[in-house]
Image (cartoon, grey):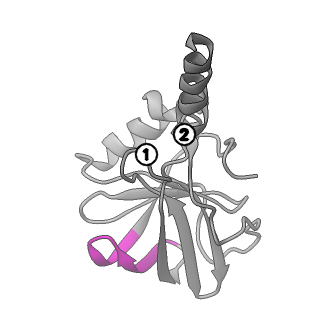
Amino acid sequence: MMYLSVIFIWFFLTYCSTWRKPLRLTRIDYVGNEFKTNGFYYNRSLGNFLVYVNGIYLHGGTGQESLDAITYKWTKSKFSESDFLNKTAMDWGVFQINYPSILIEHWHGGDVGTPYPTATYHGKILNDTTIVLYDWPTGQDTFYYHPMSPKPDSTNRFIK
């Protein structure tokens, strides 16, 4: 009985921590030049996200104090470390471009014991440094490009 309990706990901790609904979008390499990918995008409330040329999206959350704080988060804090970013599927996703439209889907936090749900954002690329997302959690919002180097590695165990 003890053996079964240990197996159950191991299974729960290993698999349930990454339990997630499948993404509807597929990862497609971005080969265009309609918008920049060598930094991050932020809004007025300092919500932010990263996009990569391999079609990966990484949600950065909200509530940072400044652009410098966002840059620090992604380049020097634990969030910049690949092993930290690979602990959970939350915030990883993909994007697709059908210029001028952008479509983003990513996993976000859900209730304990349930799969990570996905969030989908539709938007429009206004120019190579400005994106409007129509269904951001706070409603329509405009995101502006900010250069950053190096960016955290987009390699993760959730999206191939």
Provide the residue span drawn in magenta: 129-143
> Residue 106 at what x, y percent from top left?
53, 61
Query: What's the amino acid at mark 2?
Result: Cys
Which label belongs to residue 16?
2
Quadrant of the image containing the N terminus: top right
Which label belongs to residue 113?
1
> Crowding at label 2, few (<14), some or many (≥20) Cα neighbours within 10 Å?
some
| Left or right: residue 146 compared with residue 65 | right
Does residue 81 appear in this view?
no
In the depicted view, which residue is nearer to us: 115 or 63? 115
Q: Could you say which quadrant of the image residue 29 lies in?
A: bottom right
- Mark 1, secondary structure of its residue: loop
Earlier along the polypeptide chain: callout 1 or callout 2? 2
Q: Residue at x 57, y 42 (%)?
A: 18
Q: Residue at x 26, y 65 (%)?
A: 44
> Residue 150 at what x, y percent from top left?
58, 40
Is residue 59 part of the magenta span, yes or no?
A: no
State if disc 2 and disc 1 touch (CB < 8 Å). yes
Q: Residue at x 69, y 43 (%)?
A: 155
- Mark 2, secondary structure of its residue: helix
Vertical position of residue 14 compared to residue 16: above or below: above
Query: What's the amino acid at mark 1?
Result: Gly
Is residue 139 part of the magenta span, yes or no?
A: yes
> Residue 156 at what x, y percent from top left?
67, 42
In the depicted view, which residue is nearer to us: 101 or 150? 101
